[in-house]
Amino acid sequence: MSYPVSVVIPTIDSRRDFLFNRCLPSVQLADPAQLIVIFGEGNGNEKRNAGARAATQPYLLFVDDDSQISSEILRDMVGALESHQEASIAYSGYRTILHEANRAKYSRDTYPGKWNPDRLRRENYIDTTSLIRRSAFPGFDPAIRRFQDWDLWLTLSTRGAHGVYISKTLFDKYVLDENVSARIPEQEAREAIARKHSL
């Protein structure tokens, strides 16, 4: 039995090998009811929004094309939201892996901690790969080119949404190359978030 989740993966050409060899197999093992891969032009937010428009399931999970998810992620995240009907977001710990020459060079585990709107206004501590009720999803802002996840969580928080934290490592994020959004200076990106959300 598949989980009632639409998984959306925006991708770029340089990640195709990882996408087909690592990312997609991991998503298929997690057993979503719908899998949407968005190729082609447009920035990451535009691709994510296109995927969300094509989604048919009550839950959305956005997975980056340089990530590998646990086979348990949908079971745990769907279970968390079904057990907490007041929550709109389920998120977890994750591992970041620097990958060079086909081998892992180092890894770092991140455990975000419980949902805290005040902390969210100070720092970006929840990853994009979090389960969202499709009915609550406001869309990614195409004008925000870095910290898109932070912008999304802040938008949801100001609308009264909150999240439930799963204290497990449920996906790996591989650093394969320079992230497209990382080309935007961090201070510039933070200032854009601060202006939009009056931080």
Image: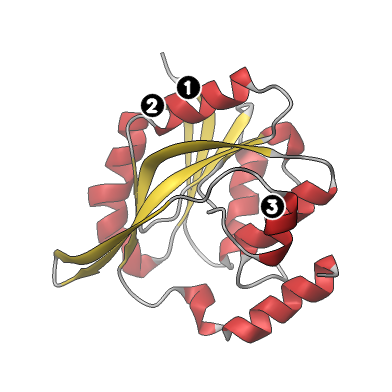
Q: Give the residue drawn at x 60%, y 18%.
A: 83
Give the mark nearer the N terminus: 3 vs 1.
Answer: 1
Tell me the residue that label 3 is attached to: 153
Q: Amino acid at mark 3?
A: Trp
Between 136 and 24, the residue placed more toward the observer is 136
Label 2 environment density (alpha carbons within 10 Å; few <14, some 14–19, many ≥20)? many
Look at the picture and state if 1 lies above or below 17. above
User: Judging from the image, what secondary structure is the residue with disc 1 in?
Assistant: strand
Q: Report if the CB atoms under discs 3 and 1 are less than 8 Å apart.
A: no
The quadrant the N terminus occupies is: top left
Q: Amino acid at mark 1?
A: Tyr
* Mark 3 → mark 1, Cα distance in angstroms: 23 Å
Look at the picture and state if 71 lies above or below 52. above
Between 125 and 77, the residue placed more toward the observer is 125
Q: Which mark is residue 91?
A: none
66 sits left or right of 182 in the view = left
User: Judging from the image, what secondary structure is the residue with disc 2 in?
Assistant: loop
Between 21 and 177, the residue placed more toward the observer is 177
88 sits left or right of 21 in the view = right
* Mark 2 → mark 3, Cα distance in angstroms: 25 Å
Q: Which mark is residue 3?
A: 1
The x and y percentages for residue 36 are: 49, 42
Q: Give the residue drawn at x 50%, y 48%.
A: 129
Q: Amino acid at mark 2?
A: Asp
Tell me the residue that label 2 is attached to: 31
Give the mark nearer the N terminus: 2 vs 3.
Answer: 2
Name, please, the residue furthest toward the top.
1
